[in-house]
Amino acid sequence: MHPEQGSPFDVIIIGAGFAGLYGVHQAARAGLNVLGLEAGAGVGGTWYWNKYPGARCDVESVDYSYSFDEELQQSWTWTERFAAQPEILAYIRHVAERFDLERHYRFGQRVTAARFDEAAAQWTLRTERGDEFRSQFVVFATGCLSTPIKPNIPGIETFAGEELFTAQWPEQGVSFEGKRVGVIGTGSSGIQVSPVIAREAEALTVFQRSANFSVPVPNRPWTDDEQSEIRATYRQRRENSYYAPAATPHRSLEIKALDLTAEQREQAMEDRWNGGGVLFNKVFPDQNSDLAANELVREFAVAKIRAKVDDQSVADDLIPYDHPIGTKRICTDSGYYEMFNRPNVELVNLRREPIAEVTPTGIRTAEKFIELDTLVYATGFDAMTGTLLRIDLHGANDARLGDVWADGPVTYLGFGIPGFPNMFSINSVGTPSVMANMVLHSEQQLDWVLALVEHCRANGIRTVETREEAAVKWTDHLLEVAEGTLFVKADSWYMGANIEGKKRVFMPYIGGFGNYRRYCDEERENGYPNFELTA
Ligand code: NA7
C-alpha cells in the first residue's frame, strides 16, 4: 500500500502515454495534487506496448511530438522523417525525465474498477493488485487502441509453438531465424511487421481476411538543412496545425477531383503518394465523400499495387474490393507488397480459403496444412470503447457504463458522459483523435479538461457533469457528419465492425480537428453551458 492511498487526490489521470503524461505535467504545474496510474511498467502508452519490429508512425516526427514547450521542441532532434517505435519511446522517456513526471505515477497498476461516491463527490479507483485510490476528478487517458483482441478460431488454444501479439511485444525482442512463421492480420501492424519477419524467417505465411491499402513510407534521415529550417519555423508549423483538419500542417488540395484535368489529377496523386499515407488519404477535398472521386484515387493505388507484385494472381488477392479507399485507415509500409515476390513468403486469402482450425503444430485451412513454429497475432483492438468498457465503471446512482452505452457510446465532445460526474475521457468516441495527429490532439484534450477542473476549483464547484441533451445532440451530430462521407460504407474498427456483437456506429468525429477544437473553445468561452456545475 502506498502512503498516498489514504488521502484523496485532486485528480487521478490513468495512462502514461502522450495524453496522460502531458496531463500529469500540466496538472502538477497548476498545483493540483495529481496521481498517475499506468498498467505498464513504464511510460509510453501505445509506443510502450507496440514494440514489434517495423513499428513506425505515419505522421512526420516533427509533427508527432509535443508543442507545449519551446525549449523541448528546439532541443530534441528527430533523426528520421517518420520515426520508428524505439525513437518515439526514447522521446517519451526523455520528456518524462526532463519534466520529472515518473514521480507522480504508480506503474503496474491496471485500473479494473471505478465508482463515484455522490455524497463525498469522489471517485474510488481499484486496481488489479487490489489497491484503492481516491480523487475528486478522474481522467481516462487510456488510449483508443489499447485493448488488443485475440481471434476466436477453433483450436487456437492448442497451438504449442510461440505466440506473439504485435500489441504486447516482448521487451527482449524475438528472433525469427530458421522459423516458420504465420502472421494473422493485415492492418497497419501486420503490414509493418511482416516484411521484417520475411527477411529473417525460413518461411512466412500471411493470413489475410481483408486486404488493405498501404502506401510506402517515404522515410529518410532529416538533413541538417531541414533540421535548421524546422527549428527556425517550428512555431509557425504548429500554428498551421492547431486548427488544421488533421492537426498537422498538411491539407487536401482545394480543387475537387473532377474539376481537375486528368494530368493534373495524376500529378497530384503521384505527389501525395510520394508523401506517404496521411497525404494520400487526402489528395482531393471530395475524396472521402464522393464515390467517383474516391474511385480515381482507388484506381491509382491499385495500379501501384499491381506494379509492385510480380504474380498478378497474388496482386488480385492484395487489392481491397470491399471498401472505398481511405474508409479503413490507409496503412504505411516499408516493402509490404514487394515482400510477396520473395520465395519464402506466401499469402493465404482467408476469404477463399478460410482457416478450419489451429492445431498444436500449425494452421489447417480449407485447402492445406501449414506447419508453423511461431504465430503472430496482428488482429487489432476493441477500439475506442473497449478499454473503458472493460473497467467496472459506475457513475452517479450506481449507473454502469456498460448499461448506459448498451445502445452505443454517447459523449459530449468526447470528454463528458452523462451520469458520470467529475470524469473525463480523453481522445474518446466523439473526438477526431484517431483521424488526427494524436500528440497535438492530446494536448488540446488535456488543456481543455484541466481548464474546466481549474474553473471548478476557482468557483467552489464540487461536481461537473455533462448534460444528457448535449451528449445526445453531439452524438447525433457526429453521426450526421459521418453519414455525409463514405466512411460509413466500410466494415472498419471506426464502426465497431471488427468486434462480434459490438454496436455498429461510427465512433470518431470526422468533421476535422480544427472544427472540433472550435466547438471545445466555444464551450469553454461560454462558461460551460452544456455542463451541470454544482457548488
Ligand atoms: P487493424 O487495423 O484492426 O487490423 C487487424 C487485422 O486483423 C485486420 O486485417 C483484420 O481483418 C485481422 N483479423 C482480425 N481478426 C481476425 C481473424 N479472426 N481472422 C483473420 N484475421 C483477423 O489493427 P492494427 O493493429 O493493424 O492497426 C490498428 C491501428 O493502429 C491502425 O489503424 C493505425 O491507426 C494504428 P478484418 O479487416 O477484420 O477482416
Image: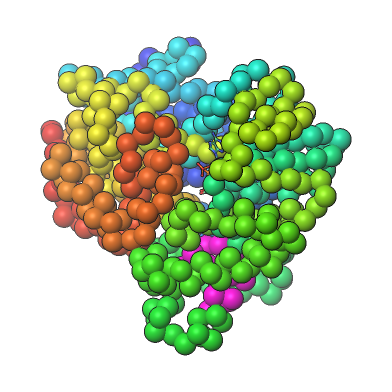
Magenta-drawn stretch contains 276: yes
Q: Is residue 126 visible?
A: yes
Q: In this view, does 50 lie above or below 70?
A: above
Q: Is residue 451 visible?
A: no
State which image quarter holds ligand 1. top right
Along the line of sight, the residue nearer the viewer: 143 or 96: 143
Q: Is the magenta stretch mostly helix, strand or loop?
A: helix
Q: In this view, does 300 lie above or below 158?
A: below
Does residue 431 appear to the left or right of 358 in the view shown? Answer: left
Q: What residue is at 21 percent from the left and 19 percent from the top? A: 398
- Residue 420: % across, % down: 24, 30
Q: What residue is at 68 percent from the left and 29 percent from the top? A: 363
Does residue 100 appear to the left or right of 125 in the view shown? Answer: right
Q: In which quarter of the image is the C terminus?
A: top left
Q: What residue is at 44 percent from the left and 68 percent from the top? A: 294
- Residue 344: % across, % down: 81, 46
Q: In this view, does 31 lie above or below 76?
A: above
Along the line of sight, the residue nearer the viewer: 429 or 368: 368
- Residue 508: % across, % down: 35, 49
- Residue 160: % across, % down: 72, 19
Magenta-colored span: 268-282
Quarter of the image for residue 48 reads top right
Q: What residue is at 26 percent from the left and 41 percent from the top? A: 411
Q: Which residue lies furthest to the front in this view?
A: 367
Along the line of sight, the residue nearer the viewer: 360 or 312: 312
Quarter of the image for residue 169 reads top right
Q: How many marks?
A: 0
Q: Is residue 343 above or below residue 113?
A: below
Magenta-drawn stretch contains 430: no
Protein image colouring: rainbow
Q: Which residue lies furthest to the right in this view?
A: 178
